[in-house]
């Protein structure tokens, strides 16, 4: 029994010593952890400030671009001649699109009708200015696209 008591007292002594050691070093550990966390928080603040600056710069650049685009659209700039060309091309595109939407026939029939109308117009111009009219009759010719 004495042996068990000795073992128990030895274990209690080791446990108390370990506890005291941990208490002693816990203050040092607290300071060390606080310093590390403080450094990391400072680094995060610096990074956040950098991100704020970058976001502000990006916003400034984007807002300048929007202002310039708005000025160009309103015609406040010198490039209004180019804008007129864009408007003209846009009008042509919209007109063609609407024409295709409301076309009464399919593509082949529409192209054939357009070709016949173009020939009629050409014949009328030739008659008026004295050259012989081109009589195609009801025959249609496919376009080559080369102008020959």
Image (spheres, helix red, strand yellow):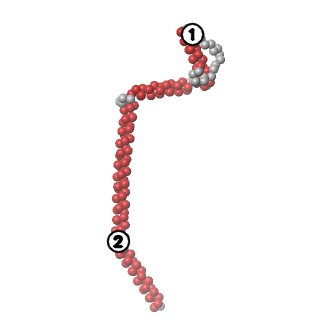
Residue 5 or residue 26, whichever sits in front: 26
Left or right: residue 13 compared with residue 131: left
Q: Disc number at residue 28?
A: 2
- The quadrant of the picture occupied by the C terminus is top right
Give the CA distance from mark 1 to mark 2.
110 Å
Q: Disc number at residue 20?
A: none
Residue drawn at x 56%, y 11% as measured from the top left: 126
Horizontal and vertical percent position of residue 141: 63, 20
Is residue 121 in view from this perspective?
yes
Q: Where is 139 relative to 80, above or below?
A: above
Mark 2: which secondary structure?
helix
Using the rendered view, name the quadrant where residue 108 is placed. Answer: top right
Is residue 110 in view from this perspective?
no
* Mark 1 or 2, nearer chain start: 2
Question: Residue tagged by mark 1?
Answer: 131
Q: Identify the residue at the far front of this view.
A: 148
Horizontal and vertical percent position of residue 57: 35, 45
Residue drawn at x 58%, y 24% as measured from the top left: 145
Q: Where is 98 relative to 7, above or below?
A: above
Q: Total number of numbered labels?
A: 2
Task: Count residues near mark 2 (Cα–Cα under 10 Å), then give few for <14, some for 14-19, many for 20+.
Answer: few
Foreground mark, 1 or 2, reads: 1
Mark 1: which secondary structure?
loop
Horizontal and vertical percent position of residue 63: 37, 40
Residue drawn at x 37%, y 41% as measured from the top left: 61
Horizontal and vertical percent position of residue 92: 49, 25
Task: Count residues near mark 1 (Cα–Cα under 10 Å), then give few for <14, some for 14-19, many for 20+.
Answer: few
Answer yes or no: do the residues labelled 1 and 2 have beta carbons within 8 Å? Answer: no
Using the rendered view, name the quadrant where residue 28 is placed. Answer: bottom left
């Amino acid at each position: 029994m004495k042996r068990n008591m000795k073992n128990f007292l030895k274990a209690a002594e080791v446990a108390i010593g370990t506890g005291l050691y941990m208490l002693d070093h816990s203050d040092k550990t607290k300071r060390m952890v606080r310093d590390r966390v403080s450094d990391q928080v400072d680094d995060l603040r610096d990074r956040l400030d950098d991100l704020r600056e970058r976001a502000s710069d990006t916003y400034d650049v984007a807002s300048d671009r929007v202002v310039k685009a708005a000025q160009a659209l309103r015609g406040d700039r010198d490039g209004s001649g180019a804008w007129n060309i864009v408007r003209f091309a846009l009008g042509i595109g919209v007109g063609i699109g609407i024409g295709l939407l409301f076309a009464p026939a399919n593509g082949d029939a529409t192209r054939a009708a357009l070709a016949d109308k173009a020939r009629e117009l050409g014949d009328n111009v030739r008659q008026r200015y004295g050259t012989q009219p081109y009589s195609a009759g009801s025959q249609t010719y496919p376009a080559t696209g080369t102008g020959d």
